[in-house]
Image (cartoon, helix red, strand yellow):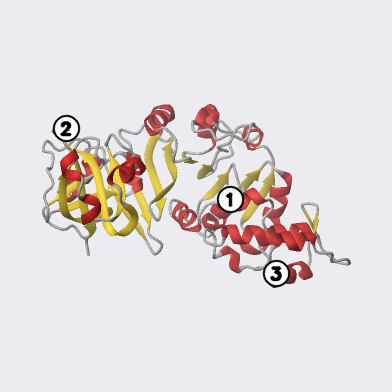
Amino acid sequence: MLIAGHQVDAAMFSYIARNRDADTCKLLLKDEPGLSFDKSFAVLQIECRRKAKDKIPFLLRHDNFLFPKALSAEQCTHEAVAHFHSSLFSFNDHVLDMTMGLGVDDYYISQCVQEVTAIEIDKDIAAVGSYNFAFLAPNVKVVNADSVQYLNQLDAGKRYDAIFIDPARRGDDGKRVFGFASCQPNVLELLPIIAQHTSRLLIKASPMLDLTQSVRDLGEHLADVWAVSVKNECKELLFKLDFSKPSLAVTQHALNHDGRAWHRFTAGANDVTPASDRARPMAGEYLYEPNASIMKLGCYSAVEHAYGVSQLAQNSHLMASSSPIPDFPGREFMIVDIIPFKGKEIKSISKRYPHLNIATRNFRLSAEALKQRLRVQDGGNTYLFATTLADGEQVLIVCKKAT
């Protein structure tokens, strides 16, 4: 079978399974005449499976799943995130995905909808996608086309229940871009024509995007924005536009997958008033660090109101409470000591706490510079947060993880 210009057969999949732990450089150099398949493509599969084993373990249970290119393994959606995407669709939906890629999102979406039409401009990626979906999800129709041209050529009456798009985040020079206007395709220019063919648009974007500017750019139909993290690393921002009506306010959703389940926090339009009081932490109290998704959204006031905690200062991104909060969306610590950041006070820290996990929040030194200043080593079970309190005092908060 010829797929994207590569000879593929059962012997190739056997070769991949046999050499899954082998040195791929040695495999490429090894003289193996008479192979019935494309050896370089087989070695590519071994390398990609290693890179993606933690991101898409379910799909990789299929021994005959193929990667079109090395970049596909690096850029593919984490399966937990793709599973979350699928939850935003309904059973009767017909969905258009304008940027297929490896198709992880399309696979999970296809399990929840009637049909997915997946557009892919690269002919080799499209060919591999067609091969994969033939056995993974026959209700995914792969189209090798420019998605902008595809959209422009649609009949005026053709409508999808939803359109999904993940614009490419690299320019022609290979450098990352972080604004919608610089991505390919430029989704901002496409909004009028997209609105002609759906009432619902979901845009997947880089977590490095300027959130405030993006909200402004997307305009009055923006209804929801999600910050999506896996193991407290923000993976993406997701925007939902509803063209059927103007949105009175944008609802923010902070999601974090801890490796077992999703943890969610939602901030509504009325959760924006900051708390009037600032906490001054004390030993024996609890210190809270919101998760990466909350930090990306900046919905600290909503967290304060929901959980009865108080920020230490406006820009500290740390919160305190006199009592434990078991379901707090982030990390929880017991405060052991509060040390003023003054010459005399910090001289003995290395003797008392020789190993520290150091983080800085709204502080004049970086974590690495502070470690050098304190003359301590990384590691151990003790944590130190260096921050500035509301009154301007700089302090070192020594903590242990709360149990």
Quadrant in which residue 104 is drawn: bottom right
Callouts 1 and 2 close, C-beta under 8 Å: no
Q: Is residue 341 left or right of residue 103?
A: left
Answer with mark 3 or mark 2, whichever residue precedes in sequence: 3
Q: Measured from the top left, where is residue 282 in percent x and y?
A: 11, 49
On-image quarter of the N terminus: bottom right
- Would residue 248 appear left or right of 31 to someone viewing this image? left
In the figure, 214 relative to 120: above or below? Answer: above
**Residue at mark 2:** 392
Q: For label 3, count other residues whose C-alpha is less than 10 Å away and answer few (under 14), some (14-19) or many (20+).
A: some
- Residue positioned 57% across, 45% down in the render: 97
Judging by the rendered image, the residue that carries numbered circle 1 is 74
- Residue 274 appears at what percent x and percent y? 18, 36
Measure how far apart labels 1 and 2 are at the Cα level.
43 Å
> x, y (%) of residue 224?
37, 41
List the residue tagged with mark 3: 19
Which of discs 3 and 2 lies nearer the camera? The answer is 2
What amino acid is labelled 2 in the image? Gly
